[in-house]
Image (spheres, rainbow, N blue to C red):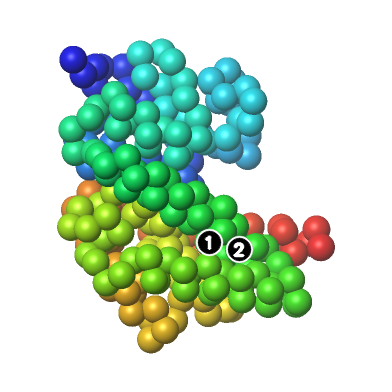
Amino acid sequence: MEKSNKGVQLVGFWVSPFVHRVKWGMKLKGIEFEYIEEDVFNRSPLLSQINPVTGKVPVLVHDGNPLPESSIILEYLDEVWSHAPLLPLDAYQRAQARFWATFADQKVFESAWLSVCSKGEIQEKAVKDAIGHLERMEEQQGGRRFFGGDTIGHVDLMMGFVAYMLPVWEEVAAVTILDASKFPNLAAWKSNFVDHPAIKGDLPFKDEMFTYFQGRREVHLQRI
């Protein structure tokens, strides 16, 4: 018997792509939850209490039990609320989805974010790496509506930042990573993703993201 939605809270930060992954996953599953906004630059006692190891968001609190890390939370959602699964039911396909989700997180995200936080040769290499990683994802996407087929799944959520946040990063850093003419599959996927009812109603405003990430870029460049 599945657990109820009672006692489900999500502690997050408004612009965090990791938090949005979890929000979307819960909305796709129809899980009701209380959202608690956290100032990650001035951590509250609550965040220190529920995630003392890293002090990062998101943190899912279910029946008083805290769980950090977006990818782990998404898998937990599937295990506790098994309806509308985010991961494939087939064991091999599920393993493949985990692989590409990790690739999106550790390769695509990291290189794209480095392009925002750097300049010169380091930035040039980060952009080149990000493009190379997206080439892998373009091939994997294969022209389907979503990575898993007709419905949004685990890999889509892990890649979600590409659909709405990457264009802001490109503008802030004055670089081009996802050229629609070179990535037709991903360009079409972006539109399908952000147009989904569970996604489009809960995206940060572009101008607010631009201001925030412009500030983060300035902070990082000062450290170089």
Residue located 27% across and 55% down the image: 148
**Callout 2–callout 1 Cβ contact below 8 Å:** yes
Residue 74 in which image quadrant = top left
Q: Left or right: 195 with respect to 67?
A: left
Quadrant position of the N terminus in the picture: top left
Residue 111's mark? 2
Q: Nearer the viewer, residue 98 or 25?
A: 98
Tell how many labels: 2
Element type at mark 1: helix
Residue 87 percent coordinates (x, y)? 30, 42
Dot 1 corresponds to which residue? Answer: 108
Residue 217 percent coordinates (x, y)? 65, 62
Q: Nearer the viewer, residue 158 or 116?
A: 158
Q: Does residue 94 appear in this view?
A: yes
Task: Tell me which amino acid carries mark 2.
Answer: Ser
Q: Does residue 24 appear in this view?
A: no
Classify 20 as above or below 218. above
Residue located 19% across and 38% down the image: 84
Q: Left or right: 192 with respect to 169?
A: left
Residue 143 in which image quadrant = bottom left
Residue located 45% across and 40% down the image: 71
Q: Nearer the viewer, residue 99 or 204?
A: 99
